[in-house]
Amino acid sequence: MDKQNSRFRWVVFATVLFTYVIMASQRTAPGLITDQVMSEFNVTASTIGLLTSIQFFVYTGLQIPMGVMADRYGPNFFLIIGAILTGLGTIIYSLGTHEFVLFFARILTGIGDATIWVNMVLILGQWFKVKEFVRLIGFAGMAGSLGFLLATVPFTAWIGFLGWRPAFFSVGLLLCLCGILLYFVLIYKLKPPNEPKAAKNEIHREKTMAVIRRIFSDRQAWALFFCHFGIVGAYVGFIGSWAVPYGMNVYGMTRSDISQLIMIGMIGALLGAPLTSWLSSRLGTIKRPYVIVHTTILVCWAAFLLFKGNPPLFMLILLLFIIGFGFGASALTFAVVRQSFPIIDSGVVSGFANTGGFLSAALLPSIFGMVLDYFQIASGSMVKGYFYGFITPVIFSMIGLIGVCCIKEKRIEAEKPEVS
């Protein structure tokens, strides 16, 4: 089958993205039942914090190994197994009767979640030409943001209707069914009848350590690592940890009010992913719009410092929307990967770049928290602590801007129609 000209590629696209939406929702969904888990299992806030972060650390640690394995053995198998593992982890979480079971469930979910992005990028790279890929990677990024939105009001309503255990069990079951659907779409449907067993690819492959050394010494790969470090971590790290207490302590908002503001940032991310990829495709360049996005994000984080950590409310809403929009544009990192590296290396480079983004997301909450603790002890002023805390996302954004400026790209040529 000529994958890149087949109508079946849209079936693949829809199936993979639907699975990604459901998997992405389970990254943040456990946060909706924090109080219920604390009372039901009689655990401390620090235990809940570790339970929340463990999936994230597993995800980050597996990005490069997953990229290597996806390049070597193909992405289809790992995506199918990942969907099923995420589903099983979610089901076990819903049935857990002890905190150790919950930890095991989140680790299993993290292993499954670690397969989705790298393998999805590789699968779309196989099925779509470069110009189409640049447009569609934005929709892939939007699917992740849609998953985060799904884990807010809709999933809260689902928990209210069923109770938290049946709600999580049903989503876990759906993910297992997604894994079975992916098997039929990516493997069973494409298997030719009477396929001869002996026809194995005799492609010479480098040893794993040789591939990793080569990627780690590649300037373009490091540019993408730092580019993703700057654009992802500042948004995910702040929104996922300190945005709610910031709104409550500095603006005196209720938890519900600041949650609505966070949703504005998520709406920005939903719009940013497809719009920036469409614009890059139209202009025939990824780097120029991406530099503008990084510069704008840096200016937005710097605005928090300019207003001493307390910008006017209307400006806060605008800043969160623009920063969210920029986070949506982070899918362009993988459009550059598709354009710059051969398919055989795309998995490990995608994993390497993604590690940069989620490493910064792991670092920012801790650094921000240490700054807050210092100023609360030294001066008793939480507002002053937030002001100095915003230096961290500004520095991260500077690193991202340097990274994107160091990217070397080829212009995206318009694809010529084939003459039959």
Image (tube, rainbow, N blue to C red):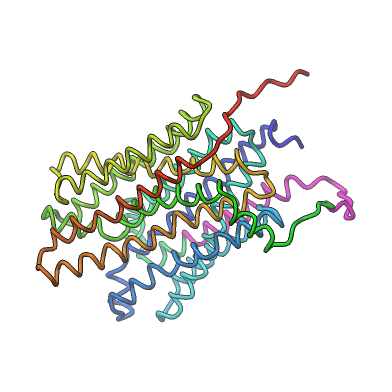
Q: How many numbered discs, if any? A: 0
Which image quadrant for residue 329? Answer: top left
In the displayed structure image, the side of residue 327 where residue 191 appears, left or right:
right
Residue at x 12% of width, y 70% of height: 378
Percent position of residue 391, x then y: 26, 54
Give the overall secondary structure of the magenta segment.
helix
Above-or-below relation of 277 to 114: above
- Which residue range is magenta in the image? 171-200
Please give left or right for residue 246 compared with residue 363 in the image: left
In the rendered image, residue 120, in percent from the top left (x then y), is placed at 58, 48
Q: Residue at x 29, y 56 (%)?
A: 392
In which quadrant is the N terminus drawn?
Answer: top right
- In this rendering, is residue 52 above or below 223? below
In depth, the one of 403 and 316 nearer the eye is 403
Quarter of the figure with the C terminus: top right
Task: Decide whether residue 196 is among the magenta residues.
Answer: yes
Does 283 sit left or right of 298 as displayed? right
Front residue (pair 272, 203): 203
Question: Is residue 403 or residue 328 the one in the foreground?
Answer: 403
Determine the residue located farthest toward the top in the rendered image: 419
Where residue 253 appears, as percent x and y from the top left, is 13, 53
Q: Position of residue 323 (x, y in %)?
A: 31, 43
